[in-house]
Image (cartoon, helix red, strand yellow):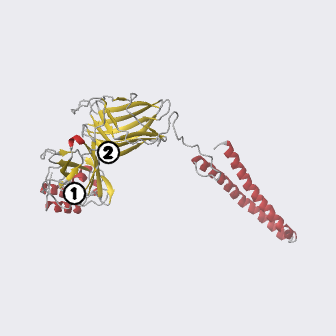
Amino acid sequence: MNKTDSKKTSKKSVSLINTFFDNLRSKFKKYSSNYKSLPIGTKRLLSLGMVLSLVIFLPFLILTIVSTTTSFYNRAATGEPTGEPPATPTPFPSSSPGLTPKPTPVGNSVGWITGNVHLSASNFYLNIDGNNLFIDNNSTLSIHSDPGNSVYTTLETTWEENGVEMRLFMYFSRDPSTNRWRVTEIRTYNGSNPGDWLFYPGFEGTDAGSAYYTGNANYYSNDGRGVVHFENLTLQLYFAGISTPTPTPGITPPPTVRPFEILLKLKGVDGDGANLANATVKFVSSALDYTLGYITPPLPMVYEGNGIYRLPFGVWSENLPAANDYSIIIKGEKHLASKFCLATGQTEHCSGSGQISLPVNPISKVSLDFTKMPLEPGDLYQQDGVANGNDFKKIINLLIKPCSTLTDQDKLVGDLDYNGCVNIRDAFLMRQTLETRYDEY
């Protein structure tokens, strides 16, 4: 608290004391005339009572004043309202020095390729304090990667805009045990001159060498000042010493990615327990080799509500050419594979060629609704392509374990309804599957 606040508090305390004694004098005058007519004994008794009252109640009055003052100081120290008019807040800067506000860009596609990282997006911009800063792929753009090693690499872009140097750096790490990578951190310059860093949280990726895709993505800086925006973001990582095809470094036109959004249900799962559980997708068509088809890496499902899960992902268009006879096979992490021949409304298993179309325009999103035929649990971890008595025994062996003692692997194996336990309901779901046993992978 500053000196001005301290003076205001002192005046407030003095005002309380003066008010008390003014009231006391007023009451004294009111009754003084009656007091003079009283007998001497009564006067002495009243005088003694007044003295005792002051002795008893005056400390309480002082304590109340001190408490009020202390409370005022405490509230002021923590930023709570103090009863005083609030100071005029300092406005947050609406722009950074040297930058001119711009409209949000549309269709600002980027394709950044180094020997380690391949990033493309159909639209990109970096928003700092309300300024949209975007890359025009001009001569000022520099792209670089730290070659790192088998578990570390970077993507580092630098450009100049309105006389201000801007940077966007992404840092990647790879888990050798799973061959999956993640973005550990994003950094950008803050639009000042000279520039300083803003820091953004990272996110999970996919297998090294495989394409990671997400639709519209906003990554917010830790202090809330910056937003990195990508649309149809695709990332592929190539780590030193890991045998994967290596792209040619440079600035290239962004490759086209077919965006997909598939809606699913899992039999026996009504809530969000399976959020971020994995599923793979296989595409079969005459445009591909009917026998081999195209299979994605495991993809995370996102809970949408009402028992529905969404599977957003993208595939390079060169891997999935346009055709109208696709069938799509979905297999969950503890489920039998289910074949879908229709884009929506399918309620029973199908055979033969599919009727799902992938358009000639590769950037048109393909939306599929497979919720009428939920995926059936049965091919339990570790999966072998069949549901049989061995899978049922895995659940029976886990029934004796209390929920609190189940490991993550136990739940991956036997928790078919994703409620955190392995119980008779999981055994019932498994038994239902054994009566049909469709696996269509």
**Position above or below: 434 against 300:** below
Marks 1 and 2 sit apart, C-alpha to C-alpha, by 23 Å
Q: Which residue is mark 1?
A: 375
**Position above or below: 22 against 172:** below
* Residue reaching furthest to the front: 360
Local packing at callout 2 (Cα closer than 10 Å; few below 14, some 14-19, many 20+) is some
Please tell me in which quadrant of the rendered image residue 67 appears: bottom right
Residue 336 visible, this angle: no
Q: Where does the image place residue 207, in percent across and percent down from the top left?
A: 25, 40
Local packing at callout 1 (Cα closer than 10 Å; few below 14, some 14-19, many 20+) is many
- Counting residues from the start of the chain, the first of labels 1 and 2 encountered is 2
Badge nearest the viewer, 1 or 2: 2
Q: Along the line of sight, which residue is nearer the eye, 50 or 146?
A: 146
Circles 1 and 2: CB atoms closer than 8 Å: no
Q: Horizontally, is 9 left or right of 174 in the view? A: right
* Residue reaching furthest to the right: 37
Q: Which residue is mark 2?
A: 214
Q: Horizontally, is 94 left or right of 167 in the view? A: right
Q: Where does the image place residue 247, in percent across and percent down from the top left?
A: 25, 31
Q: Residue at x 34, y 32 (%)?
A: 154
Please, what is the three-letter code of the amino acid marked with disc 2?
Answer: Thr
Please, what is the three-letter code of the amino acid marked with disc 1?
Answer: Leu
